[in-house]
Image (spheres, grey):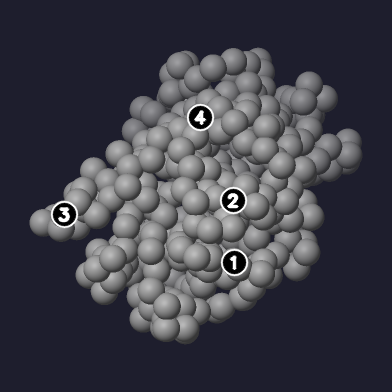
Amino acid sequence: MIKPITKDLYYIGVDDTTIDLFESQYPVPEGMSYNSYLLLDSKIAIFDTTDARTVEQWGEQLTKALDGRKPDYLIVHHVEPDHSALAMKLLEQYPGLTVVASQKAVQLLSQFFPGFDFASRAMVVREGDELCLGEHTLRFIMAPMVHWPEVMVSYDTKDQTLFSADAFGKFGALSVSGFTDQEDTDWACEARRYYFNICGKYGVPVQTLLRKVSALDVKRICPLHGPVLADTIADCVALYSTWSAYQAEKKGVLIAHASIHGGTAQAAQMLATMLEQRGIDHSVIDLCREDVSYAVEDAFMFDRVVLAASSYDSGVFPPMQNLIHHLTAKNWQNKNVAIIENGSWAPSAAKTIKDMLANAKNINIIEPVITIKSRLSDENIQQLEMLSQTI
């Protein structure tokens, strides 16, 4: 779609409603937006391209929006292929086009397009460099590891627009969620799942970027995924500050369970009922049937987590092992964790879970561990009641 944002700035991004897995791993039932922008001034700048899946539609929109003019600059905030897939084609199509990017971005572009000489067509920018387009001046801010090492963001000093790369992005097509935050009334939900699963590991670099942009007067944020933000910037920045500091967003409990024959699932559901009776906010996720990205989201969001799993091959049932792998890979920390294990003859899940969490920061294991042997006993039910009180 082509949509005006300001007098000179246009959205020329594309929705992909046919994709099932973003980055070949994250379910996107409402599709995905690949955002690209066009700034028309004395000099014309394209802000990023889109994914190869959308090449034809994006090319048609760019041509229509240019209306016979030729672009001068391609600003590359992030080299990941869903944003740079058409970079080489553009440079071939417009011989006068210059790539504006960080030094690392130029190197990575050459890797994604072997044999093409990006260096000779590039303007390498560094922290604080500016590019005058006429009425508009772009200031470049380096944002390495948010979430790749080459990432930068840019700031239009005239219209006070921040082009934020993957920061402040979310899952979902704009045709579903809405083009702006006025239309998107539930930004945080899929923005949270997007952040923790994609950028969650890089809290420190995100905090660094937040400090850099805090000195700017930002009237709108144009991310590479998701709606353009204007009215809710303060709320979104506050959430990013909480998320990137690895602090819980809400008081509540995630109960994540991995059950082979139903006994562990029964315990998880019984505990959920007890928490509900106590008025405790909670969610229950079946790791065997729901995608792990949703469990990662809730594990970061809540301040308490219950991990309930069957023992398996002298370890833990693989769906739980998978969740803990994802959590520790994303620097999960600062949580109170209770463990429920099930083992018919040699319970091993709890020890394996504790071993896997041993190097995670500030994880407090709530004792005692509850051990089920095949099915809930009367003693186990009493233990669950005690756990619900402790939680």
Tell me the amino acid under the disc marked 3: Asp
Residue 88 occupies quadrant: bottom left
Is residue 314 rendered to the left or right of residue 117? right
Mark 1: few/some/many CA within 10 Å (<14, 14-19, 20+): some
Residue 20 occupies quadrant: bottom left
Q: How far across and down, in percent of the image, does residue 363 sit?
A: 59, 18
Q: How far across and down, in percent of the image, does residue 107 sit?
A: 23, 43
Label 1 secondary element: strand
Instruction: Kindly identify the residue that appears in the image at 73 percent across and 61 percent down.
Output: 181
Q: Is residue 129 visible?
A: yes
Earlier residue among tags 1 and 2:
1
Q: Quadrant of the N terminus?
A: bottom right
Marker disc for residue 156:
2
The residue nearer to you, when weighing 228 against 129, is 129
Marker disc for residue 117:
3
Earlier residue among tags 1 and 3:
1
Q: Is residue 339 visible?
A: no
Instruction: Kindly identify the residue that appears in the image at 32 percent across and 57 percent down.
Output: 98
Q: CA distance from mark 1 to mark 2?
A: 10 Å
* Residues under numbered marks 1 and 2 in contact, where contact means CB atoms less than 8 Å apart: yes
Front position among marks 2 and 4:
2
Q: CA distance from mark 4 to mark 3?
A: 30 Å
Marker disc for residue 9:
1
Q: How far across and down, in percent of the image, does residue 268 sit?
A: 66, 41
Tell me the amino acid under the disc marked 2: Asp
Q: Which residue is mark 4?
A: 205
